[in-house]
Image: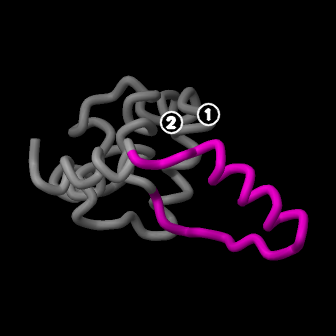
Amino acid sequence: MTRKANELLKRDLGRDLGAELLQAVREMKAGQGNVISSFNVHEVVAARTRTGLSQSAFAALMGVSVRTLQDWEQGRREPSGAAKTLLQIAQRRPEVLIEIAQ
C-alpha cells in the first residue's frame, strides 16, 4: 500500500461519520451548509466499479487517458467539473454509462 493510501485509510478510520452527518444536517437547517465540489478518491473507484468497466474502458468512456483515471483513483489529481458530473452519473445511474459504452 502506498504512503498516500495509508494516510487516507488512517484518516478514514478515525472519522465519526455519524457525527459528521448530524453536524452537516444542523448546518443545512441553519442555512450554513457549504457546497463542496471535491470528489473523494473512493467515489471515483466506486463510480467505475458500479459500471463494471475496466480502467481502460472507463477511461475511454470518460474521454481521458488511463493514467488520468489512475491519478484520480489514487488522489494525485482531481477530476474537472464535467468529469465530476459524469462520475456522479456513473454512481447514481451506471446503466446510462454502460448503455453509452456499448
Q: Secondary structure at mark 2?
A: helix
Q: Pinpoint residue 75: horizontal percent, then vertical percent.
A: 27, 59
Front one among 81 and 28: 28
The residue located at (24%, 38%) in the rendering is 55
> What kind of residue is marked 1?
Arg
Q: Dot 2 surroundings within 10 Å: few (below 14), some, or many (20 or more)?
A: some
> Quarter of the image containing the N terminus?
top left
Which residue is disc 1 drawn over?
93
The residue located at (33%, 39%) in the rendering is 58
Picture quadrant where residue 76 is located: bottom left
Disc 1/disc 2 C-alpha distance (Å):
8 Å
Q: Is mark 1 in CB contact (under 8 Å) with mark 2?
A: yes
Q: Secondary structure at mark 1?
A: loop
Q: Pinpoint residue 54: horizontal percent, then vertical percent.
A: 26, 30
> What kind of residue is marked 2?
Leu
In the rendered image, residue 21 lying in the magenta stretch gets the answer yes
Figure label count? 2
> Quarter of the image containing the C terminus?
top left
> Which disc, if any, is residue 102?
none
> Which disc, if any, is residue 97?
2
Q: Is residue 34 above or below residue 59?
A: below
In the rendered image, residue 27 lying in the magenta stretch gets the answer yes
| Magenta stretch, residue numbers | 14-39
Picture quadrant where residue 31 is located: bottom right
Q: Is residue 47 above or below residue 2?
A: above
Q: Is residue 98 above or below residue 39?
A: above
The residue located at (63%, 53%) in the rendering is 20
Q: Nearer the viewer, mark 1 or mark 2?
A: 1
In this view, the residue farthest toward the left is: 2
